[in-house]
């Protein structure tokens, strides 16, 4: 049981490049979410999903796309990277309706130059 | 606008004392409030959850209180240890949305 896994751990992009951050969980959790964490700003919700085929926007969705074709996977796509997207990205999952504890992945540290 | 506030200044205490961290919120109708621990370079780890109709929750040396009238939660660590040094985050699940919102966290430093 690996929990929540994220790849890559580190990534450097140039402005305008696109990429996908991968997130997978093996706990059969319905709810998955993506956060970004910047110094002094805490975790901010980007997008979340309450089940396969269902996604919704969080607090800071602009510049990011998500899809949820399976229960296990919830990739985050950066369409055209900008320096403002330099951050640490965390994926999390939880059980029914997202009301219970969230399990976080180890994070992806992204730098956009 | 909705806001969750945690003391941004680090809290320094002596080993063995009780650490008390505060989480205040405005413009929420929370269904749940949760506390997480985060160590440098790692993802947050869940500690405790308290529901809107609960006043207090305990787990080993941890205690959380939840006052929906004051719009405040207190997080206590009794008999603190240097290993408790970390950043502690509070998070709210609003009744209107299926989204968990986090405060910016308070860093706790326990001195031996």
Image (cartoon, coloured by chain):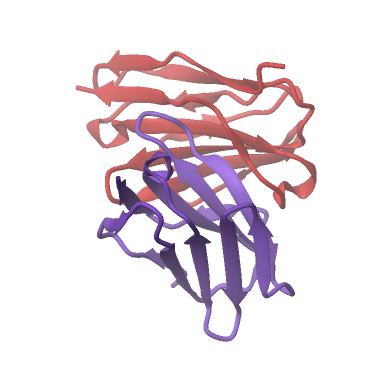
Chain colours: A red, B purple
Query: Which residue does the image show at 28% across and 15% down from the upper left?
Result: A12
Residue B57, position in %: x, y?
Answer: 67, 64
Residue B84 to residue A106: above or below: below
Quick check: B67 left or right of A50?
Answer: left
B94 vs B10, nearest the viewer? B10
Residue B98 to residue A92: above or below: below
B95 vs B102, nearest the viewer? B102
Residue A107 to residue B68: above or below: above
Is the C terminus of chain A in the top left, top right, bottom left or bottom right quadrant? top left
Res. A98 visible in picture: yes
Residue A91, position in %: x, y?
Answer: 54, 31
- Furthest toward the left, the residue is A113
Residue A97 to residue A72: above or below: below
Query: Which residue does the image show at 54% across and 27% down from the upper left?
Result: A105
Residue A8, position in %: x, y?
Answer: 44, 13
Q: Quadrant of residue B41?
A: top left
Is the N terminus of chain A in the top left, top right, bottom left or bottom right quadrant? top right
Res. B31 visible in picture: no
Quick check: A41 left or right of A25?
Answer: left
- Furthest toward the bottom, the residue is B69
Residue B73, position in %: x, y?
Answer: 53, 70
Query: Which residue does the image show at 24% across and 17% down from the upper left?
Result: A14
Total number of numbered discs in the rendering: 0
Quick check: A69 left or right of B94?
Answer: right
A54 vs B74, nearest the viewer? B74
């Amino acid at each position: 049981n690996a929990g929540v896994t994220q790849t890559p751990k580190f990534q450097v992009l140039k402005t305008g490049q696109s990429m996908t951050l991968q997130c997978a969980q093996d706990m059969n959790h319905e709810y998955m979410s993506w956060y970004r964490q910047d110094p002094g700003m805490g975790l901010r919700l980007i997008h979340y999903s309450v089940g396969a085929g269902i996604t919704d926007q969080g607090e800071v969705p602009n510049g990011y796309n998500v899809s949820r074709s399976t229960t296990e996977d919830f990739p985050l796509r950066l369409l055209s990277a900008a320096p403002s997207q330099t951050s640490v990205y965390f994926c999390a999952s939880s059980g029914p309706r997202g009301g219970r504890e969230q399990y976080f992945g180890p994070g992806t540290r992204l730098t956009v130059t | 606008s909705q806001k969750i506030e945690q003391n941004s200044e680090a809290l320094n205490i002596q080993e063995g004392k009780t650490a008390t961290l505060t989480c205040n919120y405005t413009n929420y109708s929370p269904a749940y409030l949760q506390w997480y621990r985060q160590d440098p370079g790692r993802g947050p780890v869940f500690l405790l959850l308290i529901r809107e109709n609960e006043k207090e929750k305990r787990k080993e040396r941890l205690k959380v209180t939840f006052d929906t009238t004051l719009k405040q939660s207190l997080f206590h660590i009794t008999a603190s240890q240097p290993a408790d040094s970390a950043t502690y985050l509070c998070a709210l699940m609003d009744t209107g949305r299926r989204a968990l919102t986090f405060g910016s966290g308070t860093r706790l430093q326990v001195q031996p």
